[in-house]
Amino acid sequence: MTNLRTIFYYIGRIISAFSFVAFIHCILAIIMAEYSSAIDFLITFSSFVLAGYILILLGKKGEITWVVGMVIVSLSWFFLMFLVAIPLFLSGHYLSYLDACFDAMSGLATVGFSLINDIDHLSYSLNTWRFFFPYIAGQGIILVALVFLASSPSGYGMYLGEGREDRILPNIASTARIIWSIAILYLVVGMSILWLIGINKDLGMVNAFFHAMWLYMSGWATCGLSPTSSSVLFYYSPLIDLATMVVFILGSLSFYLHYTVWTGKRLEIFKDEEIRTFLFTLGISFIFISIGIVKSGLYHDFPSFFLNALYHTTSAHATCGLSMVYPAYFVRWGEIALIGMVIAMGIGGSAGSTSGGIKILRVGIIVKALIQDIKSLAFPSSAVVCEKFHHIKDILLNDRLVRASMIIMLSYISTYFIGALVGIMYGYPFIKSLFESVSATSGTGFSCGIVSSNMPSFMKIVYIFQMWAGRLEFISIFAIISLILGRKR
């Protein structure tokens, strides 16, 4: 009971802290003369304050153990989903509250799926709301809380709960501040570049500013949400294509690596095991996708073929989901290309980054372990074979690392196929069902047409669970199970 009250108290604190986001959007709606949206955000602000206050009253301040911290994380996301969905549903752009919750979780989990109707006529304030939470969640919702709440090592459980393991600085609150410092600096630079490109494309000063902000937030958070129905294809700009690709590649790299390079160790880019594994798996995915595109015969010139193959391979591997084509085109590329994208999305980006998926580092660890086992067979039984890899520093490969990587990898793969089986149950082809399932769990947001407001409600619920579990890398689910079993004992 004590743990439950502690969980309620800190979830209430987190929700209360985020009420200011709704208030800011209410002010923005008034400035942009979007008075209907302003009322919606005022209702949302009141809901945040009320929900936070009730949970704080029901709870009690206490010690945040690792398990309790991870449970706080996982349940916070569900409470926030219901609250973030309020202005979306009130806008009238969704057929049901479930659809609004689907989009809310999609944003919080930085996936990029959307069931919204008439997206091209969305208000500035509501569009900003859609992109603001993915941007925050990309760094980590709990990282915001840790800046204010974590005054002791107990906050590490909350840090782990969002699927993060690298501790950049000894103090978790300091680590959170460093991550946000990196993110804000890139935000200023990236938005400025995209804003200038937008002005050059005659979008207008104000419109170009908002589009620059939305595109940057989506790219950096490797979310893939777009302010238009045609994603980056809307802009018909090679410069925007290039800029967004640079942004989501940077977003898919570890914050620890960013910090290490910033502090003068630039050679880490070439030495890091993650980067090497990324280039290898990116190459394999690119080959599959290229073969599929060539066989489809849709592109008759090399620049168009190469740019589409490279952009979508990189976007899939970074689990971003920004696209230069309409969703129907993925199907027209053929099954070989879809398999290549499934591989890229399934592996995902770097550990400790904004991207999702199994993570490149875990794949590299498992491959290293396999090499170690093969070497062991070639030596006498008395020989001790040691394998190490370089990730910011030299790390000795041990059973604990390999076992942890295998558990998370198997959790992802199992969820990929369970989601695919649900799609098959409703009559969708296997490869399309697998594509959507991997896209949901890895946090990519690419769709070949299954995800829509007309799909069965049960599939929407399954995808919500996949988006949530995949974003938190299943760690918080294990924590909830552990807490329940502990209470039963």
Image: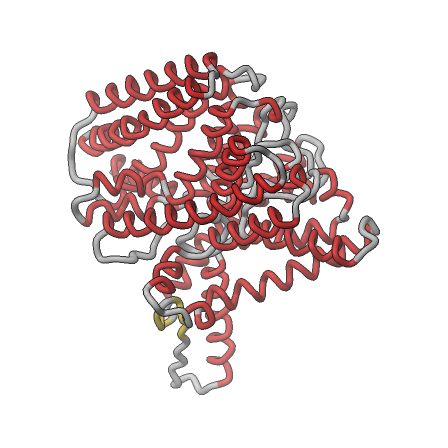
Percent x, y of residue 234: 66, 37
Residue at image coords 24%, 51%? 174
Residue 420 shows up from this direction: no
Check the image and report above or below for 453 versus 262: above
Q: Quadrant of the C terminus?
A: top left
Residue 458 shows up from this direction: yes
Residue at image coords 39%, 39%? 136
**Left or right: 275, with 77 as reference point:** right
Check the image and report above or below for 440 versus 385: above
Check the image and report above or below for 306 versus 38: below
Percent x, y of residue 190: 47, 48
Q: Quadrant of residue 74?
A: top left
Percent x, y of residue 138: 42, 43
Percent x, y of residue 365: 45, 65
Q: Nearer the viewer, residue 296 or 30?
A: 30
Q: Quadrant of residue 79?
A: top left
**Left or right: 405, with 443 as reference point:** left
Q: Nearer the viewer, residue 309 or 51?
A: 309
Number of labels in the image equals 0
Q: Nearer the viewer, residue 360 or 300?
A: 300
The structure's colour scheme is secondary structure
**Left or right: 222, with 149 as reference point:** right
Check the image and report above or below for 405 versus 415: below
